[in-house]
Image (cartoon, rainbow, N blue to C red):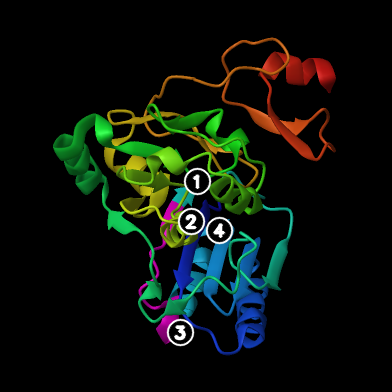
Amino acid sequence: MTTPKIVLFYVFTPLADPEAIRLWQHSVCEALGLRGRIIVSPHGINATVGGDIREVKRYVKATRGYRAFAQADIKWSDGVGDDFPRLTVKVRPEIVTFGAPDEVVVDEDGIVDGGTRLTPDELHELIRRRGEDVVFLDGRNAIEAQIGRFRDAIVPDIETTRDFIPLLAGGELDHLKDKPIVTYCTGGVRCEVLTALMRHRGFTDVYQLDGGIVRYGEKYADRGLWEGSLYVFDKRMSVDFGAPAVIGTCVECGVPTSRVINHPDRQGRDLAVVCEDCVAVGA
């Protein structure tokens, strides 16, 4: 009997030969029968990989054997089997596509000029000290926030990470430039870049939730400031921490649901929050 597991991690570090890293990562995953998505760039690596726990452990050991990735924060979760349709390993200008590869500067310690990292406990301490001045900014796509988000968070109406730079340039968030802003995303990778972009544009008190929603949910489950479910980019579509309230609503009938699917059908390219009954009707 197999035990499916999924690992999520990223490392910002200068890579002189991303293509060599791509070939190595593809070879390791293929040999172990793993599937998932890996992006390599001159800035580092961003990976989500799944398979049987024994092979995933071998993959993690091999990846950490490369000195630049040795300290990678590996986030583990339970899979459901066949969580990814295939293995893709690509070289791109950015490991998260904000459309600003030349603006991102990376050294051996990570992104230069990124926001101050906060552990879950440090986040609560910041709120204790600064109270209502603290603003949560969702660093994900709007569809993800429909089923889960931090309490009272600002959720920009964006479809892709590329939309963040026009959002910042348009002045919609300028009233927050001097406020303590805590950015958050699934595992932390998007906020690494987003906080640097914000600081370059005059935001003075910017933080990022270290380890993202995943690490916060592991710590506080449904007892903290996170509400709802976490959208994930694999067959599961969403995961829960504890027994959260359902905050999503079906786009078809309006009932509460955390189900996200391709819409209007399984071949549709748009994602939508749709309840199980409406999925059955449209199947």
Which labelled disc corresponds to residue 66? 3
Query: What's the amino acid at mark 4?
Result: Asp
In-image side of 7 versus 183 (left or right) = right
Q: In the image, residue 29 lies at what x, y percent?
A: 62, 72
Q: Earlier in the sequence, mark 2 or mark 3?
A: 3
Q: Circle 4 sits in a helix, a strand or a loop, which is it? A: strand
Which tag, 1 or 4, sits closer to the chain's start? 4
Location of residue 63 with respect to 116 vertically, above or below: below
Cα distance between the residues tagged 3 and 1: 29 Å
Residue 67 on the magenta span: yes
Res 267 quadrant in image? top right
Q: CA distance from mark 4 to mark 2?
A: 33 Å
Rendered image: mark on residue 139: 1
**What is the magenta range?**
64-76
Residue 187 seen in the figure: yes
Earlier sequence position, callout 4 versus callout 2 = 4
Is there a contact, CB below 8 Å, between mark 1 and mark 4?
no
In which quadrant of the rendered view does residue 281 lie?
top right
The reply to whether callout 1 and callout 2 are in contact (CB within 8 Å) is yes
Q: Which residue is mark 4?
A: 52
Nearest to the observer: residue 156 or residue 17: 156
Q: Secondary structure at mark 3?
A: loop
Percent of width and height locating residue 122 = 20, 48
Residue at 25%, 44% (x, y): give it. Answer: 123
Task: Give the residue pinned by disc 2.
Answer: 194
Q: Residue at x 58, y 58 (%)?
A: 51
Q: Residue 142 at x, y = what percent? A: 59, 36
Can residue 196 be found in the magenta stretch?
Answer: no
